[in-house]
Image (cartoon, rainbow, N blue to C red):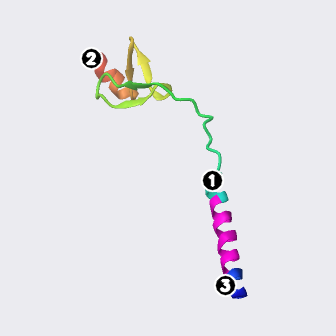
Amino acid sequence: MSRLFLLMGIAVVVYLLIKSYRKNPPPQQDNQAAEDMVRCAHCGVHLPKSESILAGGNFFCCAEHRNAYRK
């Protein structure tokens, strides 16, 4: 009978430990701010605004598309 209580006690302790670990997930890093996406005027691909090339009020994904759009 005492073995049964011992096993039940161990099971309760394991359950509480698992529950406490699942309750506190690791903090997520939300340091990165969302960045605006723009569309290439030549091919239509979407890319972050910081990676695009701005020319004549239009955004482009590369210099080749900027030059092709000008022609």
4 or 23: nearer the viewer: 4
User: Magenta-highlighted stretch: main secondary structure?
Assistant: helix
Label 1 CA crowd tier, 10 Å (few <14, some 14–19, many 20+): few
Q: Which residue is mark 3?
A: 4
Q: Amino acid at mark 3?
A: Leu
User: Between disc 2 and disc 1, whose residue precedes?
Assistant: 1
In magenta segment, residue 56: no
Q: Nearer the viewer, mark 2 or mark 1?
A: 1
Of badges 2 and 3, the one in the foreground is: 3
Contact? badges 1 and 3 (CB < 8 Å):
no
Q: Position of residue 65 (x, y in %)?
A: 33, 26
**Alpha-carbon neighbours of circle 2 within 10 Å: few (<14), some, or many (≥20)?**
few
Three-letter amino acid code of the residue under disc 2: Lys
User: Mark 3 packing: few (<14 Cα in 10 Å), some, or many (20+)?
Assistant: few
Residue 6 location (% of width, % of height): 71, 81
Looking at the rendered image, the quarter that the C terminus falls into is top left
Location of the N terminus (image quadrant): bottom right
Q: Which residues are magenta?
A: 7-19
Magenta stretch encompasses residue 11: yes
- How far, Cα to Cα, is label 1 from label 3? 28 Å
Provide the secondary structure element on which disc 1 rests.
helix
Position above or below: 39 against 30: above
Q: Horizontal placement of 9 versus 37: left or right?
A: right
Could you say where residue 7 lies in the image, as x and y percent from the top left?
A: 67, 81
* SS type, badge 2: loop
Q: Nearer the viewer, residue 62 or 39?
A: 39
Q: CA distance from mark 2 to mark 1?
A: 60 Å
Q: What residue would you read off at disc 1?
A: 23
Residue bearing mark 2: 71
> Which residue reaches farthest front?
1
